[in-house]
Amino acid sequence: MAAYKIAIVGAGPAGYFTAQALQNAQTDELTFTIDMIERLPTPWGLVRSGVAPDHPKIKTVSKVFEKIAKENGFRLFANVELGKDISLKDLRDQYDAVVLATGSAAGRKLGIAGEDLENVLSSADFVPWYNAHPDFTNVEVDLNTDTAVVIGAGNVAMDIARMLAINPSELDSTDTAEHALTKLKQSNIRCVIICGRRGPEHAAFTAPELRDLPKLENTDVYIDADQINQAALRIEQLGEVEKDLRNNLEAMRLIAEHDKKGVDRKLEIKFLANPKEIKGNGKVSEVIFTINEVKDGKVVATDKTFSIKTGLVITAIGYDAVEYQGIKIEKGRIANIAGHVEHNLYVTGWAKRGPTGVIGTNKSDSADVVQLIIENLKEPKQSEGITALLKSAHVVIDQTGWEKINASEVISGELAGKPRIKEVDWKRLISLGTS
């Protein structure tokens, strides 16, 4: 029987689905011990710190993660940072295969004037701020403006816009960070405008997310019906249209035609609006947009512009993978061929393919990478694994430690009528996990 040691760096969906694929691939002749290494004291990645708090159903995938963690041969090493507590080279020496499931945590830049003004934030900072990520509790967010602009046309942009546009009392029963909920309740924002540089047919929103928008009780949602109709005409000329795209446009049309409630909160989606310049005296006060058009299937700029007066801009135009010593970044991803980086090093999830797809996309992605690992396995290494690399004084949060943190948060939440109250202080998290 061949028993192999696999290290997975990153305890988010891509990491857990890789562990699951390894567990499912085991036979009487082939077994794996899996060590999952996570920089934070808490696992679950974007399920914990990325999914919008008002969409709790998406977070139920964590039950699958907990099942994976209970399988024999799985160990969690949280509060262990690659490149600081252990090196990638040492990790590769100790394991038969190392899988980087480290995601994409660096927010992409617009590359325009004024992007560095105060209160121009990246989704890479804003989303973890309202999701109680311990590294982002001190992000400066000023909500003392009546209008906010969100730049981007994907589900992250929509989540951000919804969080800013809904009545904050609707978040009372969610696990929104307490510091963020306090600020949102003091917010003066009543109009949130999502601006995408391309047409409705190019938007990366998904239909279920779009269909949820008219259900907002205290917010009216607007889309220009003419923009949707023109997009529909353009795609009809292309012949056969993908089902997802047709569903998206239908969901947008329903929003455009939906009866408005006449409430004071408004969320608007504008297409073909390309940010040209952000203006302000120290702090953002206006965004200038170029009006784009679609010609022969291509998005081109016109000579027309418009502007939006605003005191808050959040960019949600994608993410890039974070660099580690010994790996190469290409087009925002770890350089790889179908998930193989080199020798016994692999990559999966966003770090492999870029920030695309939903949580479930990682399942098939990870299964493909595991198949590749199995095909390339050689003689098993005789080594101790990560325990040989960590200093004896280093505090590791293992699965039992995480369960203590989890239980504490859930109990605190139950008392307040929430799924949980997340602990945001790093030292307190360590204390809960080692008590």
Image (cartoon, rainbow, N blue to C red):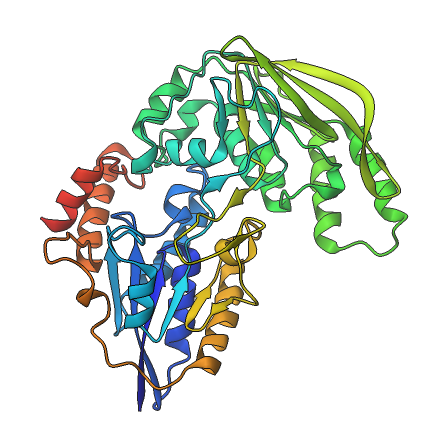
Residue 105: % across, % down: 44, 44
Residue 275: % across, % down: 67, 25
Residue 353: % across, % down: 56, 57
Nearest the viewer among 280 and 273 is 280
Number of marks in the rendered image: 0
Query: Is residue 259 visible from the viewing direction of this image?
Result: no
Residue at 29%, 65% in the rendered image: 90
The answer to which quarter of the image holds residue 33 is: bottom left
When the figure is inspected, residue 75 is found, relative to residue 218, above or below; the finding is below
* Left or right of residue 248: residue 266: left
* Left or right of residue 41: residue 189: right
Residue at 40%, 30% in the rendered image: 171
When the figure is inspected, residue 213 is found, relative to residue 26, above or below; the finding is above
Nearest the viewer among 338 and 126 is 338
Q: In which quarter of the image is the N terminus?
A: bottom left
* Left or right of residue 13: residue 383: left
- Residue sticking out furthest to the top: 281
The answer to which quarter of the image holds residue 216 is: top right
Query: Is residue 50 visible from the viewing direction of this image?
Result: yes
* Left or right of residue 36: residue 251: right
Residue at 42%, 66% in the rendered image: 18
The answer to which quarter of the image holds residue 155 is: top right
